[in-house]
Image (spheres, helix red, strand yellow):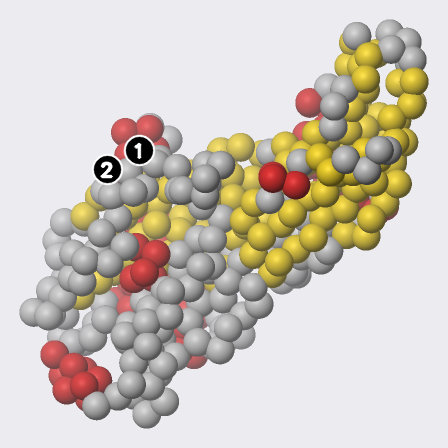
Amino acid sequence: MATPCTKADRGRRAGDAMTAVVVTGLLTCASLLGTPTPAHADSGPAAAVADHTYETNEAVLDAMAKWAPLNWSESVMGYPRGLDRDASGSVKAVHLADVRKTYAPDQAIRDAMNAAQQYAADERNPEPLRASARKLVDGWPGGTKSSRPDIRANTRDDTVPSGGQTAEQYCGMTNTAPRHPAFGQAAPCVFVGKLDEKHPVRGASHAMAGEGKLTYKVSASVNDEKSVTEGWSAGGKITPKLISKDQADIGAELSFSYSYASTSVTRLQNTLETDVEIEVPADKRGFLEGRANGAYYTGYIVLRDIDGDNQESTMAVPARVYVQAPGTTTPVTWFKRLTPA
């Protein structure tokens, strides 16, 4: 399947071998208009483990703000791999009534167009994908633009009218026919969102109350779906690992997917297994806590579609997405925590 086409395209397309590639990730794009690019993050703690003990969540977040600074808003091209999911892997339904309290869909569509324009203007990006981004803004030659955007009720209300596909299927389409004029182009889609939850907890040990020592091994592996030859690039999956002294694996079920931030020029790396010890005083509770070096952003997946009659439509689907902080290569930071017993 090619990126959506005009009637003129359909004749050329009939003789070509088209493949719909459902991409499970996304390619980062330029940041939203007015979004500041964060300063380079501090080098952060050695081996992704903070050196000191921390007694409050505020202190943890203050440290993370230096090591993995965040933008207040972000955009990513394609279908976001980092969508918020439940324990079964199903996408959580984010509702329009809740999202629009802080982010109006009309503004999000304008932000999406701006992000696509910035991506298209960046000569470092592949030309087929720059052309895909331009279609989000300008539509298709000969297409009739809709005057009213199609705003959906929640994340799962995402069927694209022209072909009955889900947004994930539609946004994963790529033109793979080498002789086709649109070869390499992908369906025009972008996620735009505003900062929701900073540095969520991604793994925590059992707590010890009273004097003693806790010993753990920690690491984090990254399954990074590298740039593909066609379509938008993918994000990946992070798996934190926390192993206690008796070799019990804690928190492996907390694997989570991520999207690269639009400002990212670096990529995540695996962290080596590191020994961690926490000295717990008699009047404290001690535990080890992993914090993701990124944040959840709540907003909309914005896409532009065209049907067989060349009628275009712009669709906005509410969504909540985890986006990796743009200035760090480390997926998780581990903190030694002490709280009152």
Q: Position of residue 62 (x, y in %)?
A: 71, 30
Q: Position of residue 139 (x, y in %)?
A: 23, 67
* Of the pair 63 and 91, the residue shown nearer to us: 91
User: Which residue does the image show at 34% across and 36% down from the upper left?
Assistant: 93
Q: Which residue is mark 1?
A: 95
Q: Residues within 10 Å of mark 1 (few under 14, many from 20)?
A: some
The first of marks 1 and 2 along the sequence is 1
Describe residue 325's horizontal placement relative to residue 149 as left or right.
Answer: right
Secondary structure under the numbered disc 1 in the rendered image:
loop
User: Which residue does the image show at 81% across and 52% down from the upper left?
Assistant: 272
- How far apart marks 1 and 2 lie (CA) works out to 6 Å
Q: Which residue is mark 2?
A: 153
Q: Residues within 10 Å of mark 2 (few under 14, many from 20)?
A: some
List the single residue furthest toward the left: 309
In the rendered image, the quadrant that contains the C terminus is top right
* Of the pair 98 and 127, the residue shown nearer to us: 98
* Residue 325 seen by the camera: no
Asked if the residue under mark 2 is in contact with the one under mark 1, i.e. CB atoms within 8 Å, the reply is yes
In the rendered image, the quadrant that contains the N terminus is bottom left
Where, by quadrant of the figure, is residue 170 drawn? Answer: bottom left
Question: Callout 2, which amino acid?
Answer: Ala
* Residue 331 seen by the camera: yes
Where, by quadrant of the figure, is residue 169 drawn? Answer: bottom left
Q: Position of residue 200 (x, y in %)?
A: 60, 34
Question: Callout 1, which amino acid?
Answer: His
Q: Position of residue 234 (x, y in %)?
A: 51, 62
User: Which residue does the image show at 36% across and 81% down from the upper left?
Assistant: 176
User: Which residue does the image show at 18% across and 86% down from the upper left?
Assistant: 14
* Of the pair 223 and 162, the residue shown nearer to us: 223
**Mark sitting on residue 55:** none
Where, by quadrant of the figure, is residue 309 drawn? Answer: bottom left
Describe residue 300's horizontal placement relative to residue 38 as left or right.
Answer: left
